[in-house]
Amino acid sequence: VGYSDTVSNRTEYELPITLKLANQQGWVKANSCIDGQGFYYTKSEEQAIILIFDIDGNLIGIYQHSSNVMPEPWSKTTGPLKTDRSPILNYEHFGVYLFLLDPTNACNKGTAYETLLASPADLPSYSIPITSDVAVSLNWYDPVLCAPGRGRYFTRPEFSHILMYNTSGNAIGIYQHTADEMPSPWLKTKEIIGGGSIAVVEVEHYGLFIYFQDPMTACQRSDADSDSVGSG
């Protein structure tokens, strides 16, 4: 997983996709395994994101939180709770999940994942259609043109997030944006320009890319699926 601001000033970095890497980078376990959710890992310098791992040490999701009022699917909450019912974050906030893998069996060893980009009904989470054809059927606007190093930006006017797909029609990422000031890794951005130099977000805002496939080859017809998870 990696973060970045704009294509012209890319400051991307990777989040650990395994628990071994997370431990090496200073992420600390915050709770015992919670059925249907997994283990939460925090890091003092990360003020907006908590990582979620399964019992086998695989990164299965991300929990985002903000003291700002945030749009749906974000929800006002005290956030994830430890097994003793005490909060991991000790304040009320707006939070949202992005599950890269289905967390249903996160506490069971040897889970074989068949469901990607899960959206559990009992948690405020992003629902991302796995292909662009499904996205179009759900009224996401297909831009047709592809932005090199980013992908195709699919939009719906009622949402404050944008979905990204490669030219093969596979979901590769999500872009969130808000007018409110946000902490790192959110970045202040003048605008977002899509393929064909068409403006996707035309006003100054704070934005955050999260990629779960490498976007650098998103516009290549021979684009192959990547094993990496990224935000950038």
Image (tube, grey):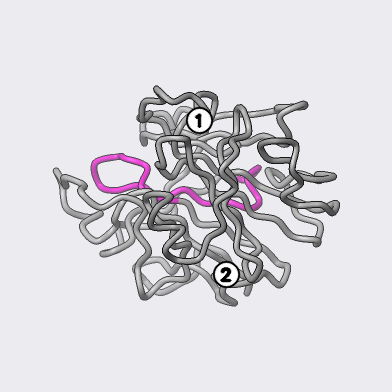
**Magenta region includes residue 54:** yes
User: Please, is residue 217 above or below residue 118 in the view?
Assistant: above
What residue do we see at 40% from left, 41% from top?
170
> Is residue 118 inside the magenta stretch?
no
Which dot marks residue 218?
A: 1
Relative to 31, say whether 172 is above or below. Answer: above
Mark 2–mark 1 Cα distance, whole angstroms, equals 28 Å
Residue at 46% across, 35% down: 167
Helix, strand or loop under label 1: loop
x and y, in percent, of residue 27 in the image: 49, 40
Comes first in the chain, label 2 or label 1:
2
Q: Nearer the viewer, mark 2 or mark 1?
A: 1
Give the left or right position of residue 64, taking residue 86 as reference.
right
Q: Position of residue 130 (x, y in %)?
A: 37, 51
Q: Disc 2 marks which amino acid?
A: Trp
Q: In the displayed structure, does residue 120 sit left or right of residue 111?
A: right
- Residue assigned mark 2: 74
**How far from the left and from the top, in percent, is residue 11?**
70, 28
The C terminus - image quarter = top right
Position of residue 180 relative to residue 202, above or below, is below
**Which of the two residues, 201 or 232, is positioned nearer the viewer here?**
201
Decide which of 164, 122 is in the foreground and name it: 164
Q: Residues within 10 Å of mark 1 (few under 14, many from 20)?
A: many
The location of residue 182, given as percent across then percent down, is 76, 55
Q: Residue at x 40, y 54 (%)?
A: 99
- What residue span does the magenta drawing correspond to? 44-61
Relative depth, front residue between 32 and 145: 145
Which amino acid, mark 1? Ala
